[in-house]
């Protein structure tokens, strides 16, 4: 789990440095533990403006859409 959250942090920083407004984190469905950890960590990240579950066509609950700002 720690490795995944470290990768998330790098991904969010890279997205912000690239000037992206939004990134998609694909974590899959599984038990939901990784999904919950990703959404919690992303919501607390200083570069993140908003976090939401993916909609149909975006990966559904197996993806998290992160707005950077």
Image (cartoon, helix red, strand yellow):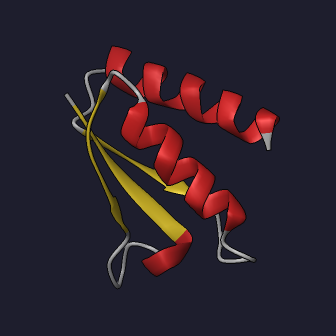
Q: Locate the N terminus and report the quarter of the image it occupies.
A: top right
64 relative to 28 in the view: left or right: left
Residue located farthest toward the top when viewing the structure as drawn? 17
Q: Is 38 placed above or below 19 here?
A: below
Which residue is at 40% across, 27% downward? 15
Q: Name the foreground residue: 60 vs 50.
A: 50
Q: Count of labels shown?
A: 0
Which residue is at 57% across, 60% downward? 36
52 relative to 11 in the view: left or right: left
Q: Is 28 placed above or below 64 here?
A: below
Which residue is at 36% across, 14% downward? 17
Q: Locate the C terminus and report the quarter of the image it occupies.
A: top left
**Residue 51: x and y, percent?**
32, 52
**Residue 68: x and y, percent?**
26, 33
Residue located farthest toward the bottom when viewing the structure as drawn? 56
Which residue is at 32% across, 23% downward? 47
Q: Is 34 placed above or below 19 here?
A: below
**Residue 41: x and y, percent?**
52, 39
Q: Quadrant of residue 62?
A: bottom right
Q: Quadrant of residue 12?
A: top left
């Amino acid at each position: 789990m720690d490795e995944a959250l470290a990768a998330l942090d790098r991904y969010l920083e890279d997205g912000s440095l690239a000037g992206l407004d939004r990134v998609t984190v694909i974590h899959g469905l599984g038990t939901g533990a990784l999904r919950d950890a990703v959404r919690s960590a992303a919501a607390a990240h200083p570069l993140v403006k908003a976090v939401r579950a993916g909609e149909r066509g975006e990966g559904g609950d197996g993806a998290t859409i992160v707005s950077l700002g």
